[in-house]
């Protein structure tokens, strides 16, 4: 089907196909009988073809709201709107039966109007199935077709009959919401809509959904029993309480590890709750990592304005976090970075016994299955764990150029997950054979359908930890399918929701800052500094490198479609989509030789540099195309040792909604110092042979908002940092780990919440200070370390939890 319809579609073809017939501005309709059947809209390609074959025609598009979660319907409507806008066709959105009846009031014949019907819902707007069995249509639809034929005498009205139910789990970014009205961005062109729709069709389903469907088919009796149980629960207005030994809230990087390790004990019943859906297949494709941002598997958080940062984005920086099985490990940039020895030794020096580098190294190695030469160094790497770590099967020339340039400027080629971190290299990734291996794929999928003592519930959002009068956690309340459930824990509740959702859940449960909770009318169970100590590796965009034409990897639209299809059909994944562009070109640098460890990390993004320079803010919010196709690079200089600290608060308007994130970037202006020094070093790469040989050079054009500063000066760097501030997606610290005497600590070194027995937090939120590097590998290690203490406490003694 795609060979016949998607590939030939170009941006200009929408106008070209429709231009064959004049389209008048007529507001008359013959859809009176459609009142009976409200689910009517217009199919894009059949509509174009029908108008092309009829000399005169005005097209009316009558649409209704898409069902929640129906990604294919959403994409069809966006495509339809785009076509209608370009061709000045009336697109009338009907959101109520009353409006529909008013709209259908006109009944007289109009010679310049065509009637086109598509059965709802859709899956593929490019399906042109006009040879349809009309018996499958509803009576109202058949009547409408007959009505149209009677008025105009047409022999056939184009009809597309599509499946009643879509299996698509993934719903991409809504371009109609983020694209400005007048823009030249490729992502906002018609091809952007076509491209996202193609991704939905090829990768929108989920392997786990398919497995579960097969299992249900194999056990229909169990499924019937489950449905009966749901009906009975709904009938009596309450849900049956479920009882487990352990409840793990959040199936992210740490939560997946914890659930795996605890369920190894067949005597323990474990419940794993995940607020998001099953992981769609699109998460497996390394080169599509940016297309995941802003989609339905991203919580879509943003920071609060502070006047000091994110100025080009209205003061709000986007903070993507994974709302899906695997959490952020399913949507991140895949880099496997552990941090520096000094980070963990620093934690231990703060009074956190058991967290020195010597203590945590065995837990890094326990989960790791290193597939490259690094695995030969058994002192630092593991080869028998569940988490695959390897390099991509494809590395392009610009990526190698960046590593060569840093090497030429003095950074050695080395394994920065071993003895020495300072250096440059193509980073290893959470991948195997050109596919992402998230925490879900590594730790949950292999055991999920084998361990009967492990229960996993997706689309289940916990909103309260239950704590009794003795200050012991004994369960959680959560919502699923608009119903409220209670799950009880005989041993422990383990919160692994991540740096944003874990503190939110604790505060909703009365565990947090007393003054804030009382102000919101939440009963205080335990007064703790939950939500404080929020910090992130601050960075910024805007330092752009242009590539020579023979070096750039940018493709035209048809070539992009072919590459996406090729990857999908390959059994052994290879090519640009099996990698993540230049993102794995990672380097660590000391801005002063006397520093004990690097204070700067460089990670390289890929861009269409001319589009970015013209509309930098909008470009950042619409990065949907594969990361491997570009003509420019944007190295991001990250401050690994930020001094600024922010906080997270519940939203007073809606405590259950998105929390307020006060990132406080550059609250301490000393955070500019490493960034300025890092940029100076970065600019020196232009003088390397690696850059000269590839025709690479920095684009010396000032970005909007920084026109008054001289390009490349310290003032310009500070201006860029304030305007084009960016997260590195490494927020930590909101449930800080610390010794008992630390009043800012939320959990003790064994990750038990102070003052509440039977409750732990095990995720990146416990980091007292962020590590020097990406945080996914450390989060998995924290899951291993925390799970080992839970197991030790319940098998060998201390059961205070």
Image (cartoon, rainbow, N blue to C red):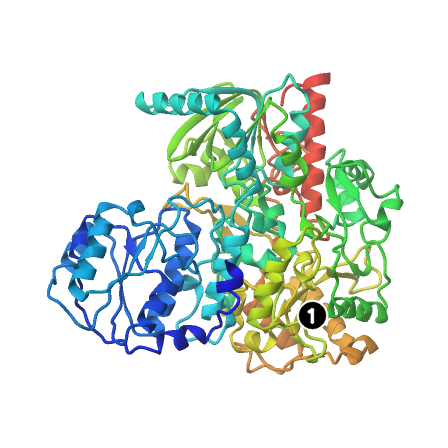
Tell me how many marks there are.
1
For this rendering, which residue is in front, 669 or 675? 675
Q: Which residue is mark 1?
A: 676
Image quarter of residue 576? bottom right
Residue lying at 60% horizontally and 69% vertically, measured from the top left: 559
Location of residue 118 in the rendering, given as x and y in whole percent from the top left corner: 32, 56
Asked if residue 41 is positioned above or below residue 26 in the image, the reply reads above
Q: Is residue 797 visible?
A: no
Q: Quadrant of the C terminus?
A: top right
Label 1 residue SS: helix
Location of residue 310 in the rendering, given as x and y in whole percent from the top left corner: 53, 64
Location of residue 363 in the rendering, given as x and y in whole percent from the top left corner: 77, 36
For this rendering, which residue is in front, 315 or 477? 477
Residue lying at 73% horizontally and 75% vertically, measured from the top left: 683
Indicate left or right for 598 with 145 as reference.
right
Location of residue 316 in the rendering, given as x and y in whole percent from the top left corner: 48, 60
Q: Is residue 603 visible?
A: yes
Indicate left or right for 758 with 356 as reference.
left
Image quarter of residue 547? bottom right
Q: Crowding at label 1, few (<14), some or many (≥20) Cα neighbours within 10 Å?
A: many
The outermost residue toward the front is 155
Residue lying at 54% horizontally and 53% vertically, measured from the top left: 202
Indicate left or right for 313 with 587 as reference.
left
Image quarter of residue 550? bottom right
Asked if residue 320 is positioned above or below residue 635 in the image, the reply reads above
């Amino acid at each position: 089907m795609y060979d016949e319809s998607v590939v030939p579609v170009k941006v200009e073809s929408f106008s070209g196909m429709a231009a064959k017939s004049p389209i008048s501005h007529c507001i008359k309709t013959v859809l009176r009988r459609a009142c009976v059947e409200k689910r009517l809209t217009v199919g894009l390609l059949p509509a174009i073809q029908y108008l092309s074959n009829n000399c005169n025609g005005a097209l009316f598009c009558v649409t209704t709201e898409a069902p929640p979660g129906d990604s294919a319907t959403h994409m069809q409507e966006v495509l339809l709107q785009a076509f209608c806008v370009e061709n000045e066709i009336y697109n009338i959105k009907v959101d109520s039966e009353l409006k529909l009846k008013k709209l259908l009031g006109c009944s007289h014949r109009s010679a310049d109007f065509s009637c086109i019907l598509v059965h709802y819902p859709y899956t593929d707007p490019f399906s042109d199935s006009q040879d349809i069995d009309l018996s499958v249509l509803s009576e109202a639809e058949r009547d409408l077709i007959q009505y149209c034929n009677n008025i105009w005498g047409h022999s056939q009205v184009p009809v597309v009959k599509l499946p009643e139910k879509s299996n698509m789990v993934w719903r991409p970014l809504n371009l109609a919401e983020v694209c400005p009205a007048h823009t030249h961005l490729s992502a906002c062109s018609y091809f952007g809509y076509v491209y996202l729709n193609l991704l939905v069709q090829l990768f929108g389903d989920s392997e786990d959904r398919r497995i579960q469907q097969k299992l249900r088919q194999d056990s229909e009796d169990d499924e019937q029993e489950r449905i009966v149980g749901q009906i009975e629960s709904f009938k009596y207005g309450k849900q049956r309480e479920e009882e487990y030994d352990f409840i793990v809230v959040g199936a992210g990087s740490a939560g997946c590890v914890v659930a795996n390790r605890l369920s190894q004990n067949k005597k323990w019943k474990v419940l794993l709750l995940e607020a998001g859906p099953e992981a769609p297949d699109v998460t497996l494709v390394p080169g599509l990592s940016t297309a995941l941002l802003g989609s339905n598997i991203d919580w879509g958080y943003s920071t609060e304005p502070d006047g000091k940062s994110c100025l080009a984005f209205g003061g709000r920086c986007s903070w993507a976090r994974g709302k899906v099985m695997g959490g952020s490990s399913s949507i991140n940039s895949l880099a496997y970075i552990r941090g520096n020895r000094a980070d963990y030794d620093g934690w231990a020096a703060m009074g956190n016994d058991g967290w020195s580098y010597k203590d945590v190294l065995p837990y890094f190695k326990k989960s790791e299955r290193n597939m490259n030469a690094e695995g030969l160094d058994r002192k630092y790497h593991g080869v028998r764990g569940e988490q695959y770590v390897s390099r991509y099967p494809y590395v392009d020339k610009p990526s190698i150029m960046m590593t060569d340039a840093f090497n030429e400027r003095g950074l050695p080629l080395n394994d920065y997950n071993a003895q020495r971190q300072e250096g440059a290299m193509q980073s290893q990734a959470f991948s195997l054979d050109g596919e992402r291996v998230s925490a879900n794929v590594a730790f949950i999928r292999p055991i999920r359908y084998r361990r009967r003592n492990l229960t996993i519930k997706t689309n289940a959002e916990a909103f309260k930890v239950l704590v009794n009068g003795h200050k012991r956690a004994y369960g959680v309340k959560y919502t699923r399918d608009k119903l409220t459930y209670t799950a009880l824990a005989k041993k422990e509740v383990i919160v692994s929701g991540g740096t944003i959702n874990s503190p939110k859940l604790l505060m909703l449960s009365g565990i947090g800052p007393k003054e804030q909770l009382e102000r919101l009318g939440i009963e205080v169970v335990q007064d703790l500094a939950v939500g404080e100590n929020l910090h992130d590796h601050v960075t910024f965009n805007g330092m752009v490198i242009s590539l020579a034409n023979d070096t750039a990897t940018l493709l035209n639209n048809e070539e992009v479609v072919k590459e996406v299809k090729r990857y999908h059909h390959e059994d052994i994944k290879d090519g640009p989509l099996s990698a993540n562009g230049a993102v794995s070109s990672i380097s660590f640098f000391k801005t002063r030789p006397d520093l004990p460890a690097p204070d700067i990390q460089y990670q390289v993004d890929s861009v269409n540099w001319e589009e970015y320079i013209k509309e930098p803010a909008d470009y950042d919010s619409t990065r949907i195309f594969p990361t491997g196709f570009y003509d420019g690079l944007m190295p991001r200089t990250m401050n690994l040792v930020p001094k600024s600290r922010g906080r997270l608060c519940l939203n007073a308007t809606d405590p259950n909604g998105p929390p307020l994130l006060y990132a406080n970037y550059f609250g301490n202006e000393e955070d500019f110092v490493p960034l300025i020094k890092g940029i100076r070093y970065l600019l020196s790469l232009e003088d390397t042979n690696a850059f000269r040989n590839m025709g690479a050079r920095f684009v010396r054009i000032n970005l909007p908002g920084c026109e008054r500063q001289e390009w490349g000066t310290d003032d310009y760097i500070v201006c860029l940092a304030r305007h084009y501030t960016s997260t590195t997606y490494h927020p930590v610290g909101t449930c800080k780990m610390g010794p008992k005497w630390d009043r800012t600590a939320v959990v003790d070194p064994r990750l038990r919440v102070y003052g509440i027995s039977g409750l732990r937090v095990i995720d990146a939120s416990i980091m007292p200070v962020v590590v020097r590097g990406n945080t996914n590998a450390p989060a998995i290690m924290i899951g291993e370390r925390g799970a080992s203490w839970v197991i030790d406490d319940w098998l060998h003694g201390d059961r205070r939890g």
